[in-house]
Image (spheres, grey):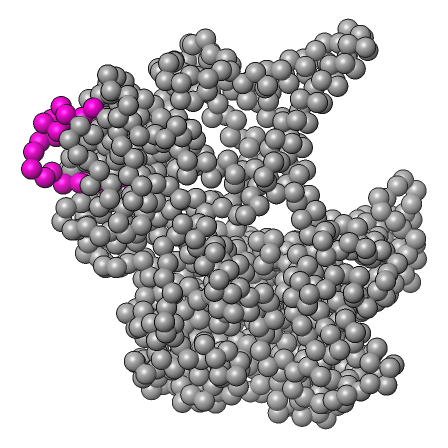
Amino acid sequence: MYILGINAVYHDPAACLVKDGRVIAAAEDERFTRIKHGKRPIPFSTYELPFHAIDYCLREAGITLVDIDHVAYSYDPFLLLGRHRHAATITLPLEPGAHPTPAEWEAAWDPLFLASIVNAPRHLAGGAPHHLRARFRGARADGPYRWHFVEHHIAHAASAFHASPFDEAAVLTLDGRGEKATTSYSLGSGSQLRWLGQVNFPHSLGLLYEQVTGYLGFLPSSDEYKVMALASFGKPRYLSTFREIVQVGSNGQYTIQPLSLEERFGPARMKGGPLEQRHYDIAHSLQIVLEETALELVDWLYQETHADNLCMAGGVALNCVMNARLRDKGPFKHIWVQPAAGDAGTALGAALWIDALERREQGNKGDNGRLFRMDHAFLGPSYSDDEIEQFLCWSKLPYRRLTSIADEVAGILVEDKVVGWFQQRMEFGPRALGARSILASPISPGMQARLNEIKDREDFRPVAPVVLEEEAPRWFAHAGVSPFMLFVYDVLPDKVDRIPAVQHVDGTARIQTINRQQHPLYYDLIKAFQARTGVPVLVNTSFNTRGEPIVCTPRDAIECFWTSHLLIRCLAALIAQEFDAADYEVIIADDAACDETRRVVDDCCSGKSRVPGSLARKQCPGPEVRYVAVTGKHGPAAARNAGWRVARGEIIAFTDDDCVPTPGWLRAGLAAFTDGVAGVSGRLIVPLECVPTDYELNAARLATSTFVTANSFYRRACLARIGGFDERFTSAWREDTDVYFTLLERYASDDRGRVNTRDRPYYDTFEVRQPVVLARAPCGCSGDERSSLARGFVYAPDAVVIHPLRSAQWGVSLGQQRKSMFNALLYKKHPALYREKIQAAPPWHYYAIVGALLVVIGALLGRKQGLAFGATCLWMFLTGRFCLQRLDQTSRERRHVAEMLVTSVLIPPLSIFWRIRGAIKFRVFFL
């Protein structure tokens, strides 16, 4: 019997597959879509189902949707029908008159919210994205599976008890809200749950914590853990205020008084604004009241149940400081918290709940009706060595197979380097537990700050330790088994100096314990590190950067590895060049100079650089690193000029802050400067998704471009002779081609055959904030002597730079049309080369589309319907063909297809507008 569990109503959409009482797979949709938390918890996103997570679960089991027996959806809209009595009859799309009067609803969007849930069976059967349809074919809204709406808090409670190691336990769920409940109490025994009571909306500890999270400048329903970390720096200055707001009554009830935080505490902190002491104090006071309230609630629950064990779930149960207080001060002997305690875990709970109900009806109780114990969270996808190697080969990244991965990685960690650890099945839940982790040594006092820098995290956030299960009591006070990082423990006083990186400001650490059965390779790694250092502890933080989900696929891991804090990553690669540090310098030219860039460079120069240790083959001092501020935002051409003009070397090498040169880049590029060479172009690698978006496909053409400044070398004398980059190119577009054409005309006018371009087109896609200029020191003869011999350009394939793709907003191609203006300037300066190398003829297809559109408008104004109809048909045909050309070899996801449809209509007129504007601005006849 297959049961598919789904969470989709609020945030953290997820799916879980249970077969005959055992969990086969579980995953959050965010890991596949790369959208943090999957979606925002707003009514208009309720219809979105976790199709990618569902597809993974089906794929893991080798089945399709028609093989599913039951679908368990972790929200029951019919619980709200006492007030919203028409919800069951609402269908999508909504039509006028199909909903009741607004007075019957909490908010105007409630009909849409409930209709989306009621229509979820239909959407599951027919709404899967095109590229996932294979495993959804044959399904219908009415089957063949049975659909179950499971109450949200029952799903939470089942995720806690039915996955726990206990046969009997009290169950507490705390979250923002379900259908009505915000807090619930039950008693679990065998495979059953007996409901004891609940607290209803609007009284919610979770929503109060969310409200304060937003007030403190963080993202509600996402950043509550940051408030918990912030609390350790504060004082109970506002404790009485929060105690007035939260009032605990009898029978497990409490009330939350309505409040305006601005009236109580003053103006809210703006996102990214400075943190004041009052912000720390507000967080601290809130945390104390949360812990006090939770203690009173579990005291009541214990009096009702007299159980030894407590199970917990709901988003509030992810508060590990509160959990530790309940462990140390509460009445229960044992506490188990669901590792996916947030809404994602309700997919697991709903599936386990329906499984228990169905098997009880069938009389198949088995192991007291429960066959699953969640002793680990590794329920997500895995990738074989061959699959990883296939991706590495395709992306042309250097790699090697390790003969003893645990020993070799332990050796790397001992050297105080940072490792991206990607092994076996991905974790289910918000914590990285050794499958998708960034690992480091806890021995270095600066490791916490260094990791926060790498991941672009706030400075106040701690990092967590993983410790061998059998060693935990010798390093952390009263430490027990804690495999999911859901409790904090005090670091023992005699161990503080040995593992300073993992101790938070309050003296605690959120530990993960690990044994060999849970993850043998992870265990062996820590054991190998202990053998070298005597410390059975590592720093374990999630393999992601700020605002991004934890990595899932090999490609996600590579992208995260290359893009974490762009300039730091680039600097690390430049400092690690296989080249004598005395023979080159690094110059950071900062367009629109900012303090953050200067600080990064200053840290590098002072030896405090937090560059990723896995790239830093030699630490500062290395080559001289200089910072050049460019006041105002003048574009990359001006920044590059500012950089090379202060350089002292004969050869100037350029790259960008979002690029990562390989260790042999500088050596290979300089080796290509034989007599007669004016410039060298290296090889650019752009990691690309197998089914890319239109933006990604266009951006990847950088890899087949000639003389992209992100990987190019010039003789300084040649640049000086032509005056450097033309600063009229104020965007990252055509300024590098202009320099190349100018040098080509100046030094290779009689010998074009020396230019090894392999007929590659010219593209340049990215805005560059900090061009990085490397200057090669003089070697043997003067720049003038060498430049007099320079007559050509060569391609150096061994001079490799990795150029990861940055994320792009919806409709990015529309903003890029402004760059068409600079095509006119390039054409004015180099008309022959432009037509030979860039564009042999004007974009007549754009002109045809715009012309047809103008005819439509003119015909409509002139009331010539026949002409308007014909011109409309022509416009639709040309626009449709353009859209199909863009969709060729790109993603067919609905969101992307919609973007292509909209932007294909707008791109031709925008492009022509900017081309004409460029022609007027630069006074050239240019089509």
Closer to the camera in the image, 494 or 354 = 354
Is 242 situated left or right of 542 in this image? Answer: right
Q: Residue 903: horizontal and vertical position, in percent?
A: 62, 31
Does residue 417 belong to the magenta stretch? Answer: no
Quarter of the rendering containing residue 177: bottom right
Residue 435 percent location from the top left of the image: 50, 69
Residue sitting at 54 percent across and 18 percent down?
843
- In the image, 592: left or right of 57? left
| Part of the protein shown in magenta | 771-791
Residue 661 in the image: above or below residue 541: above
The residue sitting at 52% across, 50% down in the picture is 270
Q: Is residue 747 left or right of residue 223?
A: left
Location of residue 609 (image quadrant): bottom left
Q: Residue at the left extreme? A: 780
Residue 534 falls left or right of residue 435: left
Placement of the N terminus among the 4 image quadrants: bottom right
- Percent position of residue 416, x then y: 30, 68
Q: Residue at x 61, y 36 (%)?
A: 888
Q: Position of residue 369 (x, y in %)?
A: 77, 86
Above/below status of 820 relative to 235: above
Question: In the image, is residue 64 above or below residue 766?
Answer: below
